[in-house]
Image: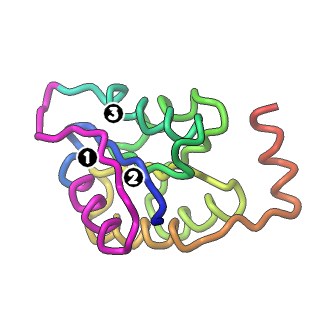
Amino acid sequence: MSERIFVGADHAGFQLKERLVNELKRLGYEPVDVGPKTMNPADDFPDYGRPVAEAVSSGAAKRGVLTCGTGLGMSYVANRFPRVRAAVAWSPEIAELARKHNDANVLVLPARFVSEEEGMEILHKWLDTAFEGGRHERRVGKIDS
């Protein structure tokens, strides 16, 4: 069975979310698109960030992906949930370090500051990078304690 990855966006991240969902499918993942299903400039990012964070927090999914204009609003929502470590990544290097050192389980992309192609590169790096553990494990363990 393929890994389920919950995905959500607001209006600013809608186009990028559509591309992320398609890319996850192409890579053999099972994306769960929590919305929005149509572009609506009046939507509110917490309505889409919350279900992704809840899925990761509860263990219904190991990982999630969110996108909004700056990535900040979605990260604020997601990081309020236990066991969620949402990282805003604007480059593949940041995504790699977020996984290696912080075991980031939610990737947040700033749609107004990365192109769709850059977003795909960042997604790939985040998906392909494992948590290093070691000295980082102790630090990550302190987040929820």
Residue type pointed to by label 3: Tyr
Residue at 24% in and 56% down: 16
Question: In the figure, is residue 3 to the left or right of 130?
Answer: left
Residue at 82% in and 44% down: 141
Tell me where the magenta segment starts and ends, as one range.
Answer: 16-42
Q: Which residue is mark 2?
A: 109
Quadrant of the snapshot with the C terminus: top right
26 is within the stretch colored magenta? yes
Helix, strand or loop at disc 1? helix
Separation of disc 3 and disc 2 at Cα? 14 Å
Nearer the viewer's eye, disc 3 or disc 1?
3
As drawn, 48 above or below 12:
above
> Any mark on residue 24, and which?
none
Residue type pointed to by label 1: Gly
Q: Which residue is mark 1?
A: 13
- Circle 1 packing at 10 Å, graded few (<14), some (14-19), many (20+), is many
Lower position in the chain sequence, tag 3 or tag 1: 1
Separation of disc 3 and disc 1 at Cα? 11 Å
